[in-house]
Amino acid sequence: MKRLLVNSVETNQKLEIIYLSDHNQLSQRVIKVIRVKDDTVLAYCFSKKEVRTFKLDNILSAGSVRKRLGA
């Protein structure tokens, strides 16, 4: 997964993640990764409309943003 996050920095690609907060709250977010460090990811979060830091261990899944069908 770390390679996918690093690759998204290089390709300027948005990712969709499932994230588990420290308070055991699940959320689905669209992010644009700015930097990947050893155990954290600095990214712009489109849900919160601000730059956030995510713990790498708390990212349960990550993938390319899927195109939505319909109106």
Image (cartoon, rainbow, N blue to C red):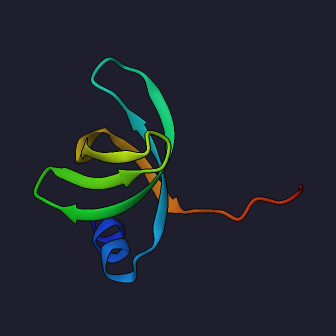
Which x, y percent locates residue 47?
Answer: 50, 42
Q: 35 left or right of 38?
A: right
Q: In which image quadrant can residue 43 be found? A: bottom left
- Residue 21, by quadrant, is top left
Is residue 67 visible to the viewer in this orientation of the structure?
A: yes
Could you tell me how many numbered marks the image carries? 0
Q: Nearer the viewer, residue 18 or 53?
A: 53
Q: Looking at the image, is 43 positioned above or below residue 48?
A: below
Q: Which residue is located at x 13 percent, y 59 percent? A: 37
Q: Is residue 14 shown above or below 47?
A: below
* Outermost residue, top side: 23
Across and down, in percent, residue 6 comes to: 28, 71
Residue at 32% across, 17% down: 23
When the figure is inspected, residue 60 is found, relative to residue 64, above or below; the finding is above
Q: In the rendered view, would you say 57 is above or below 33? A: above
Residue 36 picture location, percent across and down? 20, 62
